[in-house]
Image (cartoon, grey):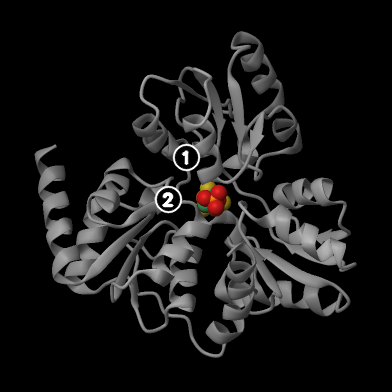
Amino acid sequence: PARRDELKARARRLLAERNAVLVAHYYVDGDLQDLALETGGCVSDSLEMARFGRDHAAQTLVVAGVRFMGESAKILSPEKTVLMPDLDATCSLDLGCPPEDFAAFCDAHPDRTVVVYANTSAAVKARADWMVTSSCAVAIVEHLHAQGQKVLWAPDRHLGRYIAEHTGADMLMWQGECIVHDEFKGLELELMKKEHPDALVLVHPESPKRVVELADVVGSTSQLLNAVTGSDRQTFIVATDNGILHRMRQLAPGKTLLEAPTAGNSATCKSCAHCPWMAMNALQGVVDCLEHGRGAITVPEPTRTQALGCIERMLDFVK
Ligand code: 13P
Ligand code: SF4
């Protein structure tokens, strides 16, 4: 704890000295989430992270999350320095959608509107008409479907299926998945629900179909958090990365938060639903990137300008 307090104090001082702000995702270490809030930064879902970074006056953004979040911040604010505590923090959805293969997929279906999840590289976004996050994906595809557009979707197959079921849109899908949410198990969740009949079940739409079907609330991380704070219920079963429990506990002290079952989530493994890349973000990394200017995100032109269009289209839509 002494070491932690010392690192936190150093990070706080460096953020002030470098005119920097910390933008964190709910899945990162609780110390980083606390630091962000204590220093005027934000902790939020990916949509709000993008908006916050774009609108903040600070010249330097420290993005605690995974690479696509840092890239989106840089695409939106090329004049700002965007630093990440660990540049190797990536995402299985991003890794599973190589830009060249994705370009070939798009080339083979020129009649479709290309909609990509935020969890993709800048090069993939450069080929897209729209970017969406889990908080606005259904509304945007609904809008496209109402205009008679057919969609090419990438990369999350579970989120894609969820959107298609809700909108009725014609969606051709890339077959990627999040290695964390893909592990939630429907059968075990059903048993857990029976043990806790009064619990509200909260599910992120990157989860498999059977798990989503058992949900009372399906939504982005912020939407799931709001479901906890806005509900009279006492008990919640949470099917998303367990990093979010930190903020849920802070905002809803006294409520009972149960982690939804995963394949390895037994007596011996209590925290399987945790993203290994989100876990690479640490206080030491924040200090190092600010002290030495390490971990700077760059997005080369013309990729940046090409990727900007799909992000701005989304941000205009959700305004
Ligand atoms: P949201 O925070 O936008 O719901 O996204 C979750 C996610 O996958 C981040 O890795
Ligand atoms: Fe990607 Fe899943 Fe990790 Fe989010 S939790 S960054 S979707 S691997």
- The residue located at (66%, 40%) in the rendering is 207
- What amino acid is labelled 2 in the image? Met
Asked whether residue 235 is in view, the answer is: yes
Q: Is the residue indicated by label 1 positioned so its CB lies within 8 Å of ligand 2? A: no
Marks 1,2: beta carbons within 8 A: yes
- The residue located at (47%, 65%) in the rendering is 51
Q: Is the residue indicated by label 2 positioned so its CB lies within 8 Å of ligand 2? A: yes
- State how many labels appear: 2
Residue 45: % across, % down: 49, 52
Front in this rendered view, residue 313 or 307: 313
Most distant residue in the top direction: 195
Residue 254: % across, % down: 37, 19
- What amino acid is labelled 1 in the image? His
Residue underneath mark 1 = 274
Residue underneath mark 2 = 278
Q: Secondary structure at mark 2?
A: helix
